[in-house]
Amino acid sequence: MRPSHVLASLGLVASLLAGCHRYRGDVEAVCDAEQRTAKQGATKLEQLDRAVLAIGPTLRTPQGKKLAARLMAEGVDPGKLLQAEAGRAGVTSCALADAYLVERERVRWEHDLGQMCAWKVDELAGKKLLTERGSKFLEELRALDEATRRARLYDAAKDAGFAGCAQAKPR
């Protein structure tokens, strides 16, 4: 191989490595976006989305900008996507992915709790809840007498910030 070909090959490898390093920097910036942006938004999910929107224009690579756009796409689980992308880029921890995953689980738990508040516990038989926590809580409720079940459901609804829970109202 000619020396000029070797040098050209080394230049290509260096360029590819530099591009990978810049993309990794973009992924790290997205992962840290929540700490870099103000806590504006009505919900935690809106705050996380605003962090992605704010960091997007500052990303340096086309792949980084594409990642920011994909995180905001309809039907995408941003936590899972960002967690996977961080792993591919060699980023060991990703606070934004963790925050999205925690928020998703909280929203799903509230959905399950809403189902338990809307229906009688016995009417939920055979229905699929979204979380393991919801399924375990439902099994716990089924094993209780009615007064204790209502009290337990009332406490859970109150902790989740539910204003009213028809099945938890004391008689």
Image (cartoon, rainbow, N blue to C red):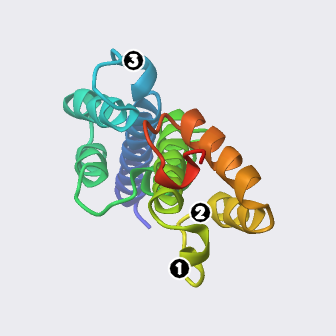
* In this picture, residue 102 sits left or right of residue 85: right
**Pointer 1: what residue?**
127
Q: Secondary structure at mark 1?
A: loop
Tell me how many marks there are.
3
The three-letter code of the residue at mark 1 reads: Lys
Which is closer to the viewer, label 1 or label 2? 1
Q: Which residue lies most toward the front here?
A: 171
Please say if the residues under marks 3 and 2 sit with CB atoms less than 8 Å apart. no
**Pointer 2: what residue?**
131
Q: Secondary structure at mark 2?
A: loop
The reply to whether residue 92 is visible in this rendering is no
Which is closer to the viewer, label 3 or label 2? 2
Q: Secondary structure at mark 3?
A: helix
* In this picture, residue 150 sits left or right of residue 165: right
Residue 72 in percent (x, y) is at: 25, 49
- Could you classify mark 2 by the number of other residues whose Cα lies within 10 Å: few (under 14), some (14-19), or many (20 or more)? some
Q: How far apart in space, not on screen, are marks 1 and 3 (Cα)?
A: 41 Å
Question: Eyeballing the image, is 134 above or below 42?
Answer: below
Front residue (pair 23, 164): 164
